[in-house]
Amino acid sequence: MAQAPNWQKSTFSGGAEGNACVELAAAPHDIRLRESDTPATHLRTTPTPLAGLLHHIKTGGRTTR
């Protein structure tokens, strides 16, 4: 039987209660993301693409050259 993911709320979601946050769970072979207002819908990725996405978000899409 597969174990349910251990979802963690993003620190950037603030102290909001209810359906106002992004959650992340580490699974054996991937990383899962979901929005709390649609918990049945998961985005699955691996560390390298997720790091690229986070870098893109943090830099506003700017690249270093």
Image (cartoon, rainbow, N blue to C red):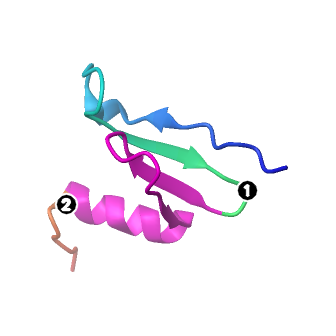
Q: In which quadrant will I find the C terminus?
A: bottom left
Residue 19's x, y, as percent? 28, 33
Q: Is residue 37 left or right of residue 8?
A: left
Q: Earlier in the sequence, mark 2 or mark 1?
A: 1
From this viewpoint, which residue is outermost toward the bottom?
Answer: 65
Observer-nearest residue: 44 or 36? 36
- Res 9 → quadrant: top left
As helix, strand or loop, the secondary structure at mark 2 comes to helix
Residue 52 in which image quadrant: bottom left
The residue at which mark 2 appears reads as 59
Q: Is residue 57 left or right of residue 31?
A: left
Question: Residue visible at 36% across and 47% down?
Answer: 38
Q: Nearer the viewer, residue 36 or 53?
A: 36
Please indicate whether residue 6 sits to the left or right of residue 1 in the image.
left
Q: Specify whether residue 51 is painted magenta.
A: yes
The residue lying at 23 percent from left, 59 percent from top is 57
Q: Which label number is shown at residue 3? A: none
Which residue in the protein does label 1 denote? Answer: 28
Residue type, numbered disc 2: Thr
Magenta range = 30-58
Q: Residue at x 26, y 66 (%)?
A: 56
Cα separation between marks 2 and 1:
29 Å
Of residue 35 and residue 46, the one placed in the foreground of this image is: 35
What is the crowding at mark 1: few (fewer than 14 residues within 10 Å), some, or many (at least 20)? Answer: few
The residue carrying pointer 2 sits among few (fewer than 14), some (14 to 19) or many (20 or more) residues within 10 Å by Cα, namely few
**29 above or below 35?**
below
Horizontal and vertical percent for residue 12? 28, 34
